[in-house]
Amino acid sequence: MDLMLSLTMNDAAAEVLGVPVGRALFAPPPGGLAPGLRDRLAEGIRRRGHVLAWAGSAGNAAEVPAPFADLTGWECAESSLHLEDHVPVDVRIVDGAPQISQDDQQVLLLHGITFALEFWQLVAVLDGLGPVRCIVSANETNATFRFHQVRDGERWNRPDLDGYRLDKMVVIDLAPAGPPGEPSP
């Protein structure tokens, strides 16, 4: 299946990634993708009822399970992983709270984007799957990657990514490509 990729980010992510000054956004992170993230990709994904989840996940949502408002919320909670648990960055504890430097947030975002681009290959082999959204965010305390199927009337993140004042947000949509000359869904 051919997929179309769409990437959006807030100004904070663009700044830390160097987009305004033209640095290469899709350059692999220093040293390549972290082994722990590569292991997660090797686990794979699969459909479980109406949801998409990591292949090793025990979750199976045929309907919206409590306490989630919708299946998108369930998928985001089930698929969420902390990038700093897999990427060698310095997480200092200051006054009992984790602290991640701006430089390490950049490293985490690069790993998250690279992870999403490689995740694309897992999505491409699933027959009949509609658009999938990957959300990468980083701030001074953590960085996360999560995914969900794109469903009408459901959304995990706010459309205005600049509304996330404390987070650097990158949203990557993977959608089946339509025939040449036709827009994709």
Image (cartoon, rainbow, N blue to C red):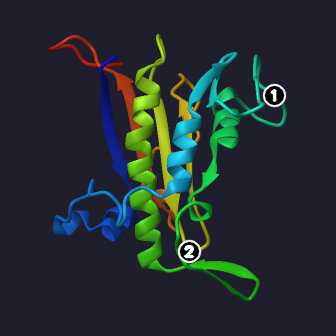
Q: Is 184 rendered above or below residue 101?
A: above
Residue 111 x, y percent position in the rendering: 43, 57
**Residue, disc 2:** 140
Q: Nearer the viewer, residue 181 or 106?
A: 106
Q: Residue at x 44, y 78 (%)?
A: 102
Tell me: 51 left or right of 25: right
In the image, is residue 75 above or below residue 24? Answer: above
Q: Quadrant of the C terminus?
A: top left
Disc 2 marks a residue whose amino acid type is Glu
Q: How many marks?
A: 2
Q: Is residue 117 above or below residue 140?
A: above
Residue 49 x %, y %:
70, 16
Residue name at image x 41 percent, y 77 percent: 103
Q: Residue at x 32, y 69 (%)?
A: 15
Residue hosting label 1: 65
Q: Residue 107 falls in which quadrant of the image?
A: bottom left
What secondary structure is marked by label 2?
Answer: loop
